[in-house]
Every structure is written in structure tokens, then in C-alpha cells.
Amino acid sequence: MTNPPSTPARLIGEPITGREDLGDVREPRQALAQFYRALNSRDLVLLAENWEQSSDAAMDNPLGGIKRGWDEIRAVYERIFRGPARLRTTRIFRRAGDGWRQVHHHGSIEDPALLAAYQQAVR
């Protein structure tokens, strides 16, 4: 018996903002929309639902370095939510149980003034 062919990745042509209908968050697109809804509304409870609750979860940001596990990651988001900074980010999700959970984040800030504001917020 052979495994069924994997579904090819589909490019998404429009930005995901978190204002989309979340629908079934077991789907990758909805998991990403859930993340952005939590981030843009600064909702730590929803953010916790989006991140995997294990030591495998990792966040790499421009100043704070690598944070591992939800407790360390949550502390960074708490500081970000208290400041004015907005980020351009890359995220990796993996299938976990009945849905998709975030296991990696990498943030990039190209604007020097915005980077300075972000660095001040997470210190």
C-alpha cells in the first residue's frame, strides 16, 4: 500500500490580516488568520491557543534572541503589546493533534526608527 500523494502548497495571493472568517482552525490558512487576529487585537489568550505548548516552540526576534517554549514567547508578546511596534514576520506551523500549531517565528524590521522602537519595547 502506498501513501497518497501530498497536496502541493498553494500560494495565497492576498494578505492575511486576522479579519477573515476563522472557520476551521485545523486548516493552515485559518491557523495563520487566527494568529494575526490574536496579534492585531493583542489577545494573549487567543495567541496561546495558536502556539504549541511545548519546548519545541521557538521565537527569534531582532533584539531578544531566541525564546523557547510558550512561557518565554508570551513574555515577549506582553512587552510588544505594551509598545507601538508592528512587525513583518515569518511563521512555521506544524500539524499537532487535530489542528495546526505555531512552532517558529522570525521577525524582521527594516525601518531603523521602527527597529529602535521595537528594541525599546522588548527590553
Image (cartoon, rainbow, N blue to C red):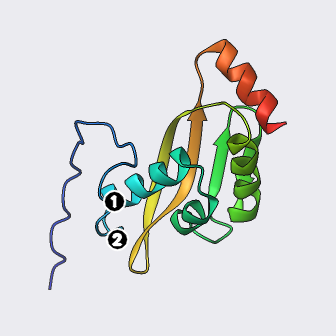
Q: What secondary structure is marked by label 1?
A: helix
Q: Is residue 72 left or right of residue 111?
A: right
Q: Pointer 2: what residue?
A: 26
Give the residue drawn at x 46%, y 48%.
Answer: 36
- How many numbered marks, from 0 up? 2
Residue identifier under label 1:
30
In the rendered view, tell whether residue 44 sits above or below residue 111: below
- Position of residue 3 measured from the top left corner of the image (x, y, whole percent): 19, 77
With respect to residue 65, does 94 lie above or below?
A: below
Measure the C-alpha gap from mark 1 to mark 2: 7 Å
Q: Look at the image and tell me in which quarter the N terminus lies.
A: bottom left
The front one of 38 and 59 is: 38
**Image quadrant of residue 56?**
bottom right
Q: Residues within 10 Å of mark 1 (few under 14, many from 20)?
A: many
Taking 115 as reference, is 64 above or below it?
below
Residue 23 at x, y percent in the picture: 28, 66
Q: Position of residue 18 (x, y in %)?
A: 40, 49
The three-letter code of the residue at mark 2 reads Arg
Residue 74 in picture, x, y percent from top left: 71, 57
- Residue at x 32% of width, y 37% of height: 15
Q: Residue visible at 31% across and 55% down?
A: 29
| Residue found at the very far top of the displayed protein | 112
Quadrant in which the C terminus appears: top right
Residue kind at label 1, given as amino acid type: Gln
Q: Which mark is residue 93?
A: none
Q: Are marks 1 and 2 in contact (CB under 8 Å)?
A: yes
